[in-house]
Amino acid sequence: MTAEAVPGRTDRKRIVTAAIKETAAQLGNTPAVCKASYIWPSVVQSFEKGTVLRAHFATIEELIGCKTRGQHRCEKALLDLLRSGRSAAAAVPRPTRRRETRMSRRMRASPRARRLARAFTLH
């Protein structure tokens, strides 16, 4: 992976926005759907930090026409980029919260109804 010389943060964001719009147009989706469904967040974060993959092919047609056994160097480089971002992009699991149920006035007033309600509450 090498650093690409893009002058400022705003310029990098414009490049990312243009790339997302172009990808969305190719896929026939909106940019929001494209970003949420097809683009791994660490790829965008890596680009914004200045880390990009080295070009392995001159054109898209050359990439499509590449026939190799196993993984090509470009595929290995992309997998390394995705793995490096996985730990940073992983969501922190939320602690499970016990859901409290609300009792009606009648249940709160009656001790027997409260006991029944507690008996049937999921623990």
Image (cartoon, grey):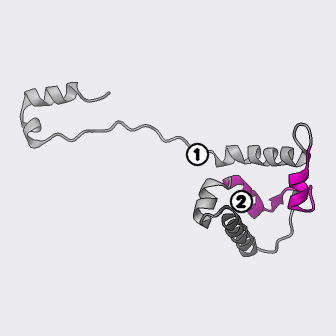
- Residue 52 falls inside the magenta stretch: yes
Q: Quadrant of residue 91?
A: top right
The residue beneath circle 1 is: 91
Looking at the rendered structure, the kind of residue marked 1 is Ala
Question: What distance separates the C-alpha of mark 2 from that of mark 1?
Answer: 16 Å
Q: Position of residue 113 (x, y in %)?
A: 10, 30
> Residue placed at 68% from the left, 43% from the top?
87
Considering the image in quadrants, where does the N terminus appear?
bottom right
**Is 84 positioned to the left or the right of 121 in the image?**
right
Say if residue 1 shows up in the picture: no
Q: Quadrant of residue 80?
A: top right
In front of the other: 88 or 76: 76
**Is 42 positioned to the left or the right of 94 in the image?**
right
> Residue placed at 56% from the left, 43% from the top?
92
Label 1 crowd bin: few (<14), some (14–19), many (20+), radius 10 Å: few
The residue beneath circle 2 is: 44
Q: Position of residue 58 (x, y in %)?
A: 93, 62
- Residue 111 falls inside the magenta stretch: no
Return the disc, 2 or 1, that comes first in the chain's sequence: 2
Looking at the rendered structure, the kind of residue marked 2 is Val
Q: Position of residue 8 (x, y in %)?
A: 77, 74
Q: Is residue 18 above or below residue 80?
A: below
Q: Which residues are magenta?
A: 41-67
* Helix, strand or loop under label 1: loop
> Residue placed at 86% from the left, 53% from the top?
64
Say if residue 117 shows up in the picture: yes
In front of the other: 24 or 53: 24
* Helix, strand or loop under label 2: helix
